[in-house]
Image (cartoon, rainbow, N blue to C red):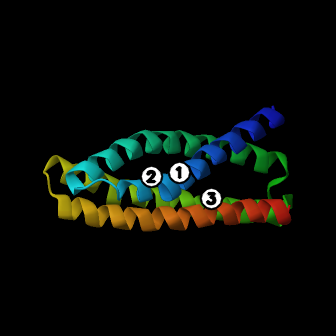
Amino acid sequence: MYTLLKFFHLAAAIVWLGGMAFVLLALRPSLGTLQTPAQRLPLLAAVLRRFFAAVWVSIGVLLLSGAYMLGHAGGQAAPIGWHLMTGIGTLMFLIFGHIYFAFYRPIQRAIAASDWPTAGRKAGGLSKLVTVNFVLGWLAIAAVSFLA
């Protein structure tokens, strides 16, 4: 059971971190080649809709599998790297919730109203927080790799 949950935990982390890499390193720069916000922003929202659905599933898997594995390791007796990963992961979950509700949902509403300036501002803020979460994800991996 433990090995299976560890596999799902790693898979969920890979989906989330890999998706952030795609958004930051491939999608965002490529959107600049489209001429108008009316072309860029609906594409961004459509890609994020699919990616964010996967992130919500990943968060659920990470929470459940992580709680089980932490308990299996003795909770407080688990290596410090695990506790750092748990804290960083919790911060990432909270930041993602903020990204989703304070940026992504308003982007959807602004696009529906053809309010391109608002959608563009929100997209810029979303990108900054995705960058923060991307860095935090790598810090979590470093913590569990070097301190576990």
Front residue of 36/41: it is: 36
**Could you tell me which residue is drawn at 34 percent across and 42 percent down?**
46
- Place residue 102 in its image quadrant: bottom left
- Quarter of the N terminus within the rendering: top right
Coordinates of residue 26 in the picture (x, y in percent) = 49, 53
Element type at mark 1: helix
Q: Secondary structure at mark 2?
A: helix
Q: Which residue is mark 2?
A: 27
Element on which disc 3 rests: helix
Q: CA distance from mark 3 to mark 1?
A: 20 Å
Name the quarter where the C terminus is drawn.
Answer: bottom right
- Mark 3 near mark 2, Cβ–Cβ under 8 Å? no
Can residue 147 be seen by looking at this rendering? no
Residue, disc 3? 89
Provide the residue designation for mark 1. 22
Q: Residue at x 75, y 37 (%)?
A: 7
Image location (x, y in percent) of residue 21: 56, 55
Query: What kind of residue is marked 1?
Result: Phe
Residue drawn 85% across and 52% down? 74
Q: Amino acid at mark 3?
A: Gly
- Residue at x-position 84% and y-position 65%: 146
Nearest the eye: 116 or 36: 36
